[in-house]
């Protein structure tokens, strides 16, 4: 009896690390095998979960609608999200939402090589949901926790195979992502002090 495929865990990741995840791989030769993005902190991601501010939407399609959205996380890093006819629900959300708006997105990482040889990373959304600030703030805290866990595993003496892969494919200091995590958490504290009336 064959096992029904289970959906991959959606990884929480900040834009700074996600946009550095330019290496993708499959774990089998099966045509339908999932494609993973290798996060620089040493974790594979077939799906990601992000929450941020949708700052801009644009129909960039030529023959049919193909929507691009820019979603900004607390560090000012940008996730680029693309949805077309094969993601009708996500495309209609990008069409209808009025930026700026907080959104939660579950989607798949996609890489694209430019003519110059650079690799751009984007998200193909499975779902886009409008959320409020409290959901965004909770996502920041949980994503910070997951990122720190990945960094600790990356720095451990018994690295996983994905940590080994990340060390091999990326020459990026994981310190960058620790700093991004601290900045993201600090950004949650700022508005309250700014909002207090001056004496």
Image: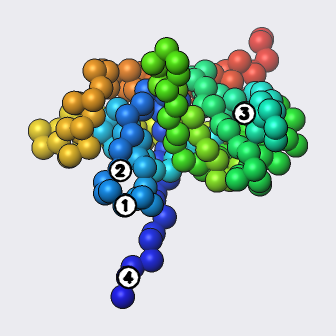
Residue 69: give its label.
Answer: 3
Residue depth check, mark 2 versus mark 1: number of the one nearer the observer: 1
- Neighbor class of circle 1 (other Cα within 10 Å; few <14, some 14-19, many 20+) is few
Disc with the residue nearer the chain's start (1 vs 4): 4
Disc with the residue nearer the chain's start (3 vs 1): 1
**Which element carries disc 4, helix, strand or loop?**
loop
- Marks 1 and 2: in contact by CB < 8 Å? yes
Residue 135 in view: no
**Residue name at image x 35 percent, y 50 percent:** 26
**Which element carries disc 2, helix, strand or loop?**
strand
Residue farthest toward the bottom in the current orientation of the protein = 1
Residue depth check, mark 3 versus mark 1: number of the one nearer the observer: 1
Q: CA distance from mark 2 to mark 1?
A: 9 Å
Q: Which residue does the numbered mark 2 point to in the structure image?
A: 26
Q: CA distance from mark 3 to mark 2?
A: 27 Å
Residue 30: give its label.
Answer: 1
**Residue name at image x 52 percent, y 31 percent:** 112
- Marks 3 and 4: in contact by CB < 8 Å? no
Residue 105 position, x and y percent, is 64, 46
Disc with the residue nearer the chain's start (3 vs 2): 2
Q: Which residue does the numbered mark 4 point to in the structure image?
A: 2
Residue 172 position, x and y percent, is 31, 21
**Residue name at image x 75 percent, y 21 percent:** 196
């Amino acid at each position: 009896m064959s096992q029904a495929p289970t959906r991959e865990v959606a990884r929480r990741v900040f834009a700074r690390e996600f946009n550095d995840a330019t290496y993708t791989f499959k774990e089998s030769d099966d045509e339908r095998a999932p494609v993973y993005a290798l996060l620089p902190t040493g974790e594979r991601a077939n799906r990601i979960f992000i929450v941020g501010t949708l700052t801009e939407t644009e129909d960039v399609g030529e023959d049919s609608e193909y929507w691009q959205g820019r979603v900004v996380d607390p560090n000012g890093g940008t996730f680029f999200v693309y949805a077309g006819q094969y993601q009708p629900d996500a495309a209609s959300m990008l069409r209808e939402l009025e930026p700026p708006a907080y959104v939660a997105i579950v989607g798949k990482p996609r890489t694209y090589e430019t003519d110059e040889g650079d690799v751009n990373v984007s998200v193909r959304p499975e779902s886009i949901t409008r959320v409020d600030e409290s959901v965004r703030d909770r996502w920041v805290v949980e994503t910070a926790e997951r990122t720190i866990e990945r960094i600790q595993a990356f720095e451990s003496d018994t690295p996983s195979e994905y940590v080994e892969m990340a060390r091999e494919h990326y020459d990026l200091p994981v310190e960058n992502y620790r700093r991004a995590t601290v900045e993201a958490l600090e950004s949650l504290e700022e508005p309250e002090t700014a909002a207090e009336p001056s004496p």
